[in-house]
């Protein structure tokens, strides 16, 4: 198979006869045979599902390209450019001379003509994208050398990421929160161990699980705290000495002063005084929010607001049906110092842990925030 046909197989579709009528044509799903990505131009397992070829009407071809975890293309360019739309999973792409970047469902990658690049799946997640590739004189790709393991491994190197990337300790917080919100105790066990290994103090882990009762309910919080007890005891039995952390030292007021503090914290996090028809209809709910959540809980100083919002966003993303609150807390997290890069990393971490729908909801909330 020559390079032109390989390019069509990789980024679009094997050619087939275009219809010669003026009527609309429907090519049914799975009516065209899949093509395996050739070993000469791919590392790992790749499948191409053709959609349409270039034609006189549209000088571009299209296909779904599915990469198993760790699979990627070789370095290549496109003489007429390419558009990729990530459909599922977590992917990676890199332009020659620039850092590796993660790509998530809904992301659109615009590759101009002649730009040397590669794309594929993240190490722990499959990825599928829609590829639409332009053609010049019947050619849509120029293949180059394969991506080395070192080049691909740069995606795992924190120094290759943005300066605002989440630390190893911070990365465990969304995973803990999402596992708690879905009552996935095995996943919670792993996330807690990951966090404690990365330096998360036991008191910080407790604080995350205590705070989230306000978003996920007491039963999930109690079950999660029980799992944390078991994790800490098991680690102790293995001779691991975890940092116990500290209890809050801030003096939390009571009565009217607590309401004043809670309202001030709520206003800072929300960006404005919280009011509206809902709180006019049931004013007591906002009193509870101000006095207890933004007063009693957010005034506790053994966990910073940055970490609290990472946990809240991840927990809300893991629960379908609370998208308005998720959007609100995405905006709130930006106000307390979380960056958009960090939120994108949060979504990627959720997807890598199998929480694909949670990652999608988080990504959509970020798009609305922008």
Image: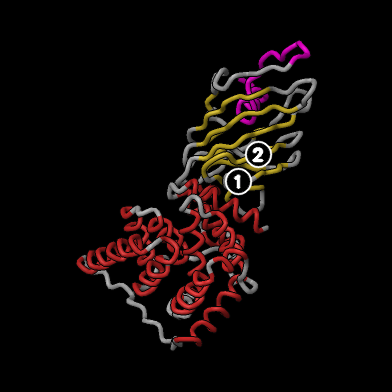
Contact (Cβ within 8 Å) of mark 1 with mark 2: yes
Residue 317, visible in the rendered structure: yes
Segment tinted magenta in the rendering? 1-23
The residue identified by callout 2 is 84
In three-dimensional space, the C-alpha distance between marks 1 and 2, rounded to whole angstroms, equals 11 Å
Q: What secondary structure prevails in the magenta region?
A: loop
- Which element is circle 2 on? strand
Figure check: 344 above or below 108: below
Q: Position of residue 187 (x, y in %)?
A: 35, 53
Q: Which label is found at residue 327?
A: none
User: Label 1, on which residue?
Assistant: 93
> In the picture, which quadrant includes the N terminus?
top right
In-front residue for pair 65/2: 65
Q: Residue at x 45, y 46 (%)?
A: 124
Q: With respect to residue 76, does 368 lie above or below?
A: below
**Residue drawn at (34%, 72%) of the image:** 202
- Furthest residue in direction front, as rendered: 281
Q: Residues within 10 Å of mark 2 (few under 14, many from 20)?
A: many
Where is residue 273? Give x, y as percent. Answer: 63, 74
The crowding category of the residue bearing disc 1, from other C-alpha atoms within 10 Å (few below 14, some 14 to 19, many at least 20), is many
């Amino acid at each position: 198979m020559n390079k032109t046909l390989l390019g069509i197989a990789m980024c679009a579709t094997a050619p087939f006869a275009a219809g010669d009528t003026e009527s609309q044509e429907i090519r049914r799903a799975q009516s065209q045979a899949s093509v395996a990505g050739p070993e000469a131009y791919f590392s790992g397992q790749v499948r191409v599902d053709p959609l349409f070829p270039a034609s006189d009407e549209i000088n571009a071809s299209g296909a779904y390209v599915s990469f198993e975890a760790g699979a990627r293309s070789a370095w290549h360019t496109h003489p007429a450019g390419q558009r990729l739309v990530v459909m599922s999973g977590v992917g990676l792409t890199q332009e020659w001379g620039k850092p590796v970047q993660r790509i998530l469902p809904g992301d659109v990658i615009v590759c101009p003509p002649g730009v040397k690049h590669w794309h594929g799946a993240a190490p722990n997640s499959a990825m599928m994208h829609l590829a639409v590739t332009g053609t010049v004189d019947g050619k849509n790709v120029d293949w180059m050398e394969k991506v080395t393991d070192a080049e691909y491994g740069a995606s795992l190197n924190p120094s290759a990421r943005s300066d605002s990337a989440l630390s190893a300790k911070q990365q465990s917080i969304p995973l803990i929160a999402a596992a708690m919100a879905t009552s996935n105790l095995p996943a919670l066990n792993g996330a807690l161990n990951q966090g404690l290994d990365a330096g998360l103090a036991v008191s910080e882990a407790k604080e995350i699980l205590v705070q989230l009762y306000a978003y996920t309910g007491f039963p999930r919080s109690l079950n999660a705290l029980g799992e944390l007890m078991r994790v800490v005891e098991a680690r102790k039995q293995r001779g691991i000495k975890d940092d116990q952390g500290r209890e809050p030292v801030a003096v939390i007021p009571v009565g009217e002063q607590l309401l004043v503090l809670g309202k001030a914290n709520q206003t800072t996090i929300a960006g404005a005084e919280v009011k509206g028809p809902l709180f006019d209809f049931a004013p007591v709910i906002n009193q509870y929010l101000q006095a207890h959540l933004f007063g009693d809980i957010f005034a506790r100083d053994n966990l910073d607001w940055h970490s609290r919002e990472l946990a809240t966003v991840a927990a809300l993303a893991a629960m379908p049906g609370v998208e308005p609150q998720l959007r609100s807390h995405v905006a709130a997290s930006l106000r307390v110092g979380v960056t958009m890069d960090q939120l994108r990393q949060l979504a990627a971490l959720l997807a890598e842990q199998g929480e694909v729908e949670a990652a999608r909801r988080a990504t959509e909330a970020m798009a609305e925030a922008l």
